[in-house]
Amino acid sequence: MQAVLSYPDISPEIFSISLFGFDFALRWYALAYIAGLLLGWRLVLRLVRTPALWPQGRAPMTAEQVEQLLTAVILGIILGGRLGYVLFYKPGYYLAHPQEIPMLWQGGMAFHGGLLGVMVAVIWFCRKHRIALLSAADALAIATPPGLMFGRIANFINAELWGRPSDVPWAMVFPTDPLGLPRHPSQLYEAGLEGLLLGLVLLVLVYRYGLLKRPGLTAGTFFVGYGLARIVIELFRQADAQYITPDNPAGWVIDLGAVGLSMGQLLSLPMIALGVGFWVLAGMRSR
C-alpha cells in the first residue's frame, strides 16, 4: 500500500458564535483575504514612502491615496473574482441558479476574474486622481503575491482545489475527495510558487535592481511570472469537475493530442501576453 502524508484536519472555521438567532463564523478563507489585503497595503505604503525607488525620486501617490486605492481594489477583487468564477467555471449552473451568485460565503472566486476587476478599479482610480497608471500597476504587482499565498493556504485548509492523483511520497488523501485517492497538495505548490517565490523575486528586483524606476517593468514581470507559474501548477492540479468526462479524464479545455490546456492554463496565456506588453511599454518609455 502506498504511504501518504496525513492530511491535517483543520476546521475551515476559526470560531463561530450565535447572536440573536443568527450564526456568525470567521473562516480561514476570509482571514486569508484580510491578511493578504493588509500586508499588500503595508507593502505599498512602504514603497511610496521610499521616493528613491521611483522615477525622478518621486512616488506616484501619497499614503492617503494608497488607503483610498485599497477600497477600490477590495471592490474589484470581490466583484471581479465572483463574476469571473461564475462566467469562467460554472456559467450553466449559475444561469439555472442566479440567486446563488451573491452567496460569496459558499465559496467560488476566480483569480483571473479578480485580476480583471482590480484592473478596472485601478484604471478608474488613476484617471480620477491623475496618478501614473504604470507606476500604480507596479506597486500593486508587489502587493499581490502575499494574498495569493494566503489564499492558497486557505484552499488547503478547506480541502478544496486539490491536485491530480499521484504516488509521490507527500501525496495526501483529502477528506472532500469522493474517490479517496492520494493526490498532489497542489494548493501548497501554488502558495509557494505563485505567492512566496514570485513575491520574493519581485522584492529583490525592486530593492536591489531598481525595477520601479522603469514604469511597467515590475507589473510585466508579475504577469509573466504568475502566468508561467500557473501553467506549471495546472499540470499537478485536478481540473474542475465540469471539464472531466470519460473521454477527457484530464479535464483539458483544448485537446492538443498527447497533452492539452486546462482552463487555468488557457486563462494564463493572456496574462503572459499582457506582461510582455508591459515590458514593451517600459522599454519604449525608457528610450
Image (cartoon, grey):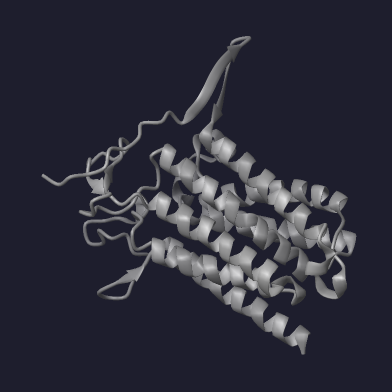
> Which quadrant of the view contains residue 243?
bottom left
Point 46% across, 31% down: residue: 12
User: Is 62 or 131 nearer to us in this picture?
Assistant: 62
> Which quadrant of the view contains residue 124?
bottom right
Q: Is residue 232 above or below residue 23?
A: below
Q: How many marks?
A: 0
Q: x%, y% of residue 120?
A: 72, 59
Point 52% across, 50% down: residue: 149
Point 53% across, 22% down: residue: 15
User: Is 108 or 10 nearer to us in this picture?
Assistant: 10
Left or right for 124, reference 276: right
Residue 199 appears in the rendering:
yes
Looking at the image, the residue that sits furthest to the front is: 208
User: Is 91 or 23 nearer to us in this picture?
Assistant: 23
Left or right for 122, reference 9: right
Looking at the image, the residue that sits furthest to the bottom is: 287
Q: x%, y% of residue 218?
A: 66, 70
The quadrant of the rendering that contains the N terminus is top left
Residue 103 appears in the rendering:
no
Q: x%, y% of residue 27?
A: 53, 31
Looking at the image, the residue that sits furthest to the top is: 20
Q: x%, y% of residue 171?
A: 27, 48
The quadrant of the rendering that contains the C terminus is bottom right
> Which quadrant of the view contains residue 46?
bottom right
Q: Is residue 235 above or below residue 185?
A: below
Q: Is residue 77 above or below residue 283?
A: above
User: Is 244 or 191 nearer to us in this picture?
Assistant: 191
Point 81% across, 47% down: residue: 67
